[in-house]
Image (spheres, grey):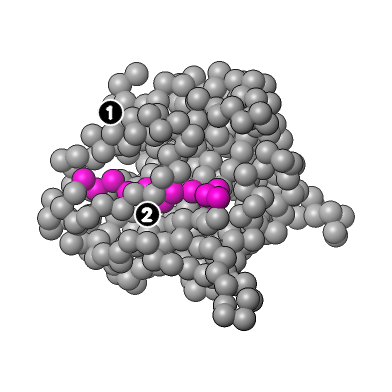
Amino acid sequence: MNAQKRITGVYKAAKRINFDDSSKIVIMSDCHRGDGSWSDNFLKNQHLFFAALTHYYNNNFTYIELGDGDELWENKRLSDIISVHVNTFWLLSRFYNENRLHVLFGNHDMVKKKKKVAKRYLETYYDEREKRVKPLFKDINIYEGIVLRHNPTGKELFLLHGHQGDLLNDRLWCLARFLVRYFWKPLETFGVNDPTSTAKNYKKGKKTERRLKNWVKGRELMLIAGHTHRPAFPEIGEVLYFNDGSCVHPRCITAIEITYGHIALVKWYVNTKDDGTMFVDKEVLAGPERILDYFSEN
């Protein structure tokens, strides 16, 4: 597989969305929402995620999810995930109803690219409390790539999950899913890491980062990915590869914010006041930097 051609194909077919210096966008990925069992990695950070997303909703952000939002390698039924994390999906539906939600698929939720899967599982859900079917994401489209095009300069930010070009996680994803679901998932209970996982395999993660950096090097655009679970935020003048991290870090979730023409890497975590009261807090890890300054130096 030619990784460079594969990524180029995603870029050419990507959905184009305009933004300007008044736009507010938050980008997250790798939530890996599960079925509420011991293997549900999202469970420990679900309250952080809900608090962060509530903040972004109330402050008129557009939310873009860069893939692996749902863990559909370890779990067979998306309906089970929606049922367990119904509050999260309810909040996401509020973004969607106001045209402020865009979703990409990753390797762990690649089945969502199929129209019939999206129609069957994402258009409606069953509300256990009200005992009736309710709308969720009517006529939703799940993309492989998105290009944010700055108005009026035309500068582009290319968003994708980041698994593209990895043979096992891309072309052979069905085999990888089988191995994870029936082989590596049980072994994880004994502390054996899944070698197919970019997030748990340092060498695979570095190889993925190198592949994405090589693609964007020399191009007049930014690339923002997920997949590796490792946040990345370059200095001005460096290769324009960004990574939003993940929502399954041990004690925080990370995100990339685009606000008023600037870009920043942030984390949400539980902080403590002097009186011992705990609260959800946000910290800026890198930036904010003016987006157009990156292009003037490359």
Callout 1, which amino acid?
Gln
Q: Does residue 172 appear anywhere in the picture?
A: yes
Q: Looking at this rendering, what residue extends furthest in the right direction?
A: 131
| Residue 109 coordinates in the image, percent (x, y) | 56, 36
Q: Does residue 142 appear anywhere in the picture?
A: no
* Magenta-highlighted residues: 239-250
| Residue 125 coordinates in the image, percent (x, y) | 74, 49
| Residue 183 coordinates in the image, percent (x, y) | 64, 20
- Residue placed under numbered mark 1 in the picture: 4
Quick one: label 1, few (<14), some, or many (20+) residues within 10 Å?
some
Kindly check if marks 1 and 2 are in contact, taking CB atoms under 8 A apart as contact.
Answer: no
- Residue placed under numbered mark 2 in the picture: 17
Nearer to the camera, 287 or 125? 287
Q: Which mark is residue 170?
A: none
Quick one: label 2, few (<14), some, or many (20+) residues within 10 Å?
few
Lateral position of residue 26 relative to residue 12, left or right: right
Mark 1 vs mark 2, CA separation in Å: 23 Å
Mark closer to the chain start, 1 or 2: 1
Examine the residues drawn in magenta and state their main secondary structure: loop
